Image (cartoon, rainbow, N blue to C red):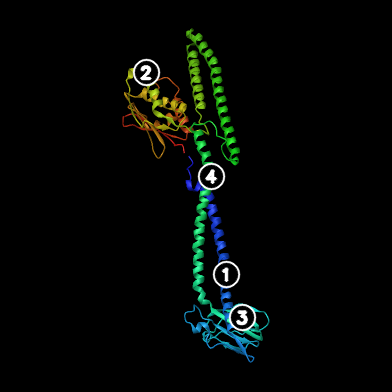
Amino acid sequence: MPTRKNNKVSSLRMRLMFGAAVTVSLFMLALFPALKQVFTVALEESIEQRLAADASALISAARIINGQLRMPEKLPDEEFDILPAQQTGMIYDNKSNLLWRSSSSKKIKLNYQPKYDGRGHEFLRGTDTDGREYFIYDVEVDLLRGKSADFSIVTMQPVSDYKVMYASLRQQLYVWLSFALLLLLGFLWLGLGWGVRSLRGLSAELDEVETGKRTALSDEHPRELLRLTRSLNRLLESERQQSERYRHSLDDLAHSLKTPLAVLQGVGEVLSVNPDNSEQVHTLQGQVNRMSQQISYQLQRASLRKSGLLRYQVKLKPLLESLLGALDKVYRDKGVVVTQNFAEELRVPVEQGALLELLGNVLENAYRLCLSEVRIRACVTAAGCELIVEDDGPGVPMHQRERILQRGERLDTQYPGQGIGTAVVKDIIDSYGGQLFVDDSDLGGAQFRIVFPLNK
């Protein structure tokens, strides 16, 4: 029997969820550098605006007196310590000569020479001799308070001042993207659950068809599944019709063979009147009986064929009671004591007719061969549904246990028959994927243990 795969692996919802999760994760990984770049650009734009504001403050503080640049002795940030940041700036003439620098810039050894080339303003980075990196904003001024001027106003800010802010933004970006990923995966899980609800409904209907609670699938499914459901309905109807034709053909075959066999039987009786024909009559009757039993065997074997689409769950107790009632009447003089041990509601995963034929053969053998006691047990284990029939008869020798499972082989030659009962039992068990074991019983006789796999 093929083993079932893990439900999580074989689940369509899990497969779709896995594919969606991989896709979304890859998208988030690709989105992170883009968002990081957006944050970086936005941060640098804010830094540029801050430095431009510092440059505007320097321009506002500058004066042209007698053609010379004059700046106040102290800038506002130098005069008021409560200001949040210092104004670090320099002023150059059009030939890149330094005219003025703020006190906060005197410690900076930045080798920067502005170019008065009419470009208006420029935002860039530079590095001092100590390896510290700075943001630099350079703006050209050609008119100062209505007077002609040609200066380069340079403001700067250490890049290190923004590294903490940049790290914080990056950390927040990680957190928010992770939260968004989890939220999106949650919505995907709910959405996929809603999407596969129709498949679960279809699966539930198939279970009802297999157990015989309904004869066909409904049309209450999404249109993408209607072709599948209608095809399955046609297949179910085709199997029913084929099974019906099969049964009718078997009935016709049985009736058509009864007449020739009856004729042969009558011929044998006529010939038996003459003592000289006794040997031929004996041979003829033996062959007729053999043909009759072989035909019965083949008809039983064909009629008990397992369906490929339907599952069965037959309650054991009522079926067993009807069988035991019939056998008690047949073997009334023997007074067989039967012990039963199984759950009241136990069900066997076999079609009712097949189970009736199987237990009928096994129990008939047990009644016939026992001394006075038969024991019947049944239970559901990890291996499947087990049926155990034991008796206190002569048992089956170890070297002959395989032989009795073959058609036509019998150990008890004192009783009539062709030995096909056990073969029919074996055929039924095999058709349902089960196993038959013949062992010794603690009652002293044989134990027939039958294991059927559970329907899943």
- Mark 2 surroundings: few (<14), some (14-19) or many (≥20) residues within 10 A: few
Q: Is residue 104 above or below residue 303?
A: below
Helix, strand or loop under label 2 = helix
- Identify the residue position indicated by label 1 in the image: 42
Identify which amino acid the numbered label 4 is placed on.
Answer: Val
Which comes before the other along the chain, label 3 or label 2? Answer: 3
- Identify the residue position indicated by label 3 in the image: 138
- Mark 4 surroundings: few (<14), some (14-19) or many (≥20) residues within 10 A: few
User: Is there a contact, CB below 8 Å, between mark 2 and mark 1?
Assistant: no
Q: CA distance from mark 4 to mark 1?
A: 44 Å
Q: CA distance from mark 3 to mark 4?
A: 62 Å
Which comes before the other along the chain, label 2 or label 4? Answer: 4
Helix, strand or loop under label 3 = strand
Q: CA distance from mark 2 to mark 4?
A: 56 Å
- Mark 1 surroundings: few (<14), some (14-19) or many (≥20) residues within 10 A: few
Which comes before the other along the chain, label 3 or label 4? Answer: 3
Which comes before the other along the chain, label 3 or label 1? Answer: 1
- Identify the residue position indicated by label 4 in the image: 196
Disc nearest the viewer among 3 and 4: 3
Disc nearest the viewer among 4 and 1: 1
In this picture, residue 374 sits left or right of residue 53:
left
Q: CA distance from mark 3 to mark 1?
A: 19 Å
